[in-house]
Image (spheres, rainbow, N blue to C red):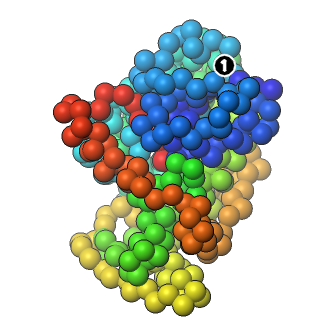
Amino acid sequence: MAHFLITGGAGYIGSVLVPRLLAEQHRVTVIDCFYFGQTTPAQHPALTCIEQDSRHISLTQLKGVDVVIDLAAMSNDPCGETFKTLTWEVNYRARARTARLARKAGVSRYILPSSCSVYGFQPEQVDEQSATNPLTTYARANLKAEQDILPLASESFCVIVLRLATVFGYSPRMRLDLVVNAMTYNAYKHGEIIIHGGGTQYRPLVHIKDVASAMICTAKAPTKIINGEIYNVGTESLNCQINNIAWQVQQQLHKKGRPIQIIHNGPQDLRSYQVSFTKIQAHCSWNSHHKLNKEIQYLIEGLDNKRINIDERCYTLNWYQRIFMATGTRPMKATTLT
């Protein structure tokens, strides 16, 4: 079995990915600052957890690793705009440095989780060949990391970029600042959904378990097919208008006898794009399997039975601002991606 090194392995995606890798009998090393707590399986014999800033990874730590999945990053647009310098340091410079060290250490495969937000506003459906149009610090830093890391690909060092659609669904490190999760919780808790930006803007969605499966799939795919490639990760059936997401949340709660009000607020959001996902399906035989309505229902059930624990850490930006206020300094450790 392979040895995976996962930066940000205790984050929203890492908390779902790491148990999947362990279940497949892989050896896993997690490097994370654990700002959001320790969500990885306790005392697993194949798991090593290191509390460390991803900007300080050493060549020695990468020796003997087969696959790096570099999840550590500032995780969304609000964090990117609030902590611009840190976003460039972690999302771009640290990951470019880790990729260079991984190649030098003899790692065979490096996977960069990027974001479909690099497409920005697009009037037509986009694919991996389309021009990018990043509108935020978060998106620009991700794109710059792609541009620096892809040229490192060689016969002995396989590089893959995964541009993730907007992720949703339950994770042990739960987030309520992602559109589906946020709408579901706000409707459940407050009986209303507030839509900012008009609601006609499109977002591509992907379930968190499908993200984990895509990462595992590309970690195993033949090098000659995927080396140096960019893949959008999601499904075209989940290119959704924000209004439609709100309507589906409303309908699921109506089934439980809960009336939900939808309120529109604020100017039009220019971040609108629809994405093609046919390339990863063709190259890797990968498909998304989770449906929006079913997963909204699962989130509601999790809130009903208290499986989903709600606290301040579910709101990434607020949690970092609290850290900033507590220490009196900008957070200087790496954080964890969506």
Up/down of 50 relative to 126, above or below: above
Q: Residue at x 41, y 45 (%)?
A: 75
Q: Residues within 10 Å of mark 1 (few under 14, many from 20)?
A: many
User: Which amino acid is tagged 1?
Assistant: Val
The residue indicated by pointer 1 is 65
Residue 182 at x, y percent in the picture = 43, 65
Residue at the far left in the pictured view: 328
Q: Nearer the viewer, residue 9 or 119?
A: 9
Relative placement, left or right, of 215 versus 330 is: right
Residue 230 appears in view: no
Quadrant in which the N terminus is drawn: top right
Q: Nearer the viewer, residue 255 or 276?
A: 255
Q: Nearer the viewer, residue 234 or 50?
A: 50
Q: Residue at x 19, y 33 (%)?
A: 328
Relative placement, left or right, of 4 versus 142 is: right
Secondary structure of the residue carrying tag 1 is: loop
Q: Quadrant of residue 289?
A: bottom right
Residue 333 appears in view: yes
- Tally of marks: 1
Q: Quadrant of residue 69?
A: top right
Q: Residue at x 49, y 83 (%)?
A: 250
Up/down of 171 relative to 215, above or below: below
Relative placement, left or right, of 34 versus 24 is: left
Residue 3 at x, y percent in the picture = 71, 24
Q: Residue at x 29, y 32 (%)?
A: 331
Residue 296 at x, y percent in the picture = 58, 71
